[in-house]
Image (cartoon, rainbow, N blue to C red):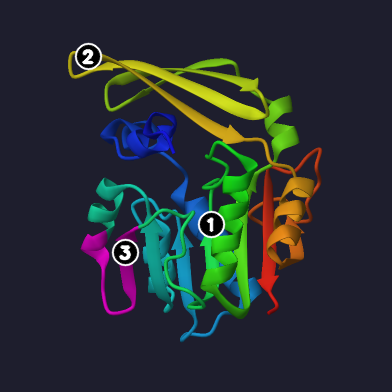
């Protein structure tokens, strides 16, 4: 693939990315993870893959709950940071989610907080789902926590300004060719900077197609971090649970 198109390679590895998103609600994230654990009831010897783990905060929380966790992410800087928290039941590695990390090795795979839909084609999305299946054990479960495309479009904020770490981020959003395009402009360290984020508007029906194509079985959907039922019009999230049956 043309490296220039991989916007996430540079942006997610940038210190500015972590400045912009420094105030994410991690208490909400930990609440969600606890709800998932209560619902799924993994065993203490079950292996969990945190796919696209970022700096590993959620992997660390899962590990503190007593689980054997591996976190992988494409960002070298994020994984370098995460490795400071490693122990005998918590490991981190740089990895591209389109590839198989360890075949038939995980009872659970978590892909959380819209860490999907970054790629240039439906084929690559299907490649990710196929790789997820290959990494699950039989009866293993994947959790994909994604945006609710219809609500995102309906509530899109075209322009906003955020100030973090003394940097004034000018953010614009638009929908183009089935993607939400976020353009981020700012001045820092004496230079002008421009980044883009692009996330595909993937519907539940689209995800069903990916699951059917790769042989994963949809077992449930939720619409938010309380694990309430999914409603296409009103839900904040689209949370998908699917199982590898063979």
Residue at image mark 3: 92
Residue at image mark 1: 111
Q: Position of residue 45 (x, y in %)?
A: 46, 86
Label 3 SS? strand
The answer to whether 174 is drawn above or below residue 60 in the figure is above
Does the image show residue 227?
A: no
Query: Would residue 93 be found to the left or right of residue 23 on screen?
Result: left
Count the labels in the image. 3
Q: Which mark is residue 91?
A: none
Does the image show residue 80?
A: yes
Residue at image mark 2: 191
The answer to whether 22 is drawn above or below residue 126 in the figure is above
Q: Which circle's residue, 2 or 1, is located before the other in the chain?
A: 1
Q: Residue furthest left?
A: 190
- In 3D space, how far apart are the residues under numbered discs 3 and 2 (Cα atoms)? 33 Å
Label 2 SS? strand
Q: Residue at x 47, y 20 (%)?
A: 183
Q: Position of residue 123 (x, y in %)?
A: 62, 46
Q: Which circle's residue, 3 or 2, is located before the other in the chain?
A: 3
């Amino acid at each position: 693939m043309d490296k220039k198109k991989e916007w996430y390679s540079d942006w997610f590895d940038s210190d500015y990315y972590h400045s912009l998103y420094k105030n994410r609600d991690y208490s909400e994230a930990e609440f969600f993870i606890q709800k998932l654990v209560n619902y799924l009831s993994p065993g203490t010897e079950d292996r969990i893959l945190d796919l696209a783990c970022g700096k590993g905060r959620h992997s660390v929380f899962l590990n503190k709950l007593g689980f054997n966790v591996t976190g992988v992410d494409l960002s070298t800087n994020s994984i370098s940071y995460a490795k400071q928290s490693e122990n005998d039941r918590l490991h981190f590695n740089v990895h591209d989610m389109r590839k198989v990390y360890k075949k038939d090795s995980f009872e659970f795979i978590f892909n959380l907080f819209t860490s999907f839909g970054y790629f240039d084609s439906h084929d690559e999305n299907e490649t990710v789902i196929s790789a997820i299946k290959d990494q699950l054990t039989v009866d293993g479960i994947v959790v994909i926590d994604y945006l609710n495309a219809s609500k995102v479009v309906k509530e899109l904020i075209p322009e906003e300004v955020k100030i973090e770490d003394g940097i004034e981020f000018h953010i614009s959003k638009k929908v183009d060719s089935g993607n939400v395009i976020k353009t981020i402009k700012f001045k820092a360290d004496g230079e002008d900077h421009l980044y883009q984020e692009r996330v595909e508007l993937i519907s539940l029906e689209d995800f069903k197609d990916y699951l059917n194509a790769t042989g994963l079985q949809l077992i449930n959907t939720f619409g938010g971090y309380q694990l309430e039922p999914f409603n296409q019009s009103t839900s904040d999230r689209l949370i998908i649970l699917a199982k590898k049956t063979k």
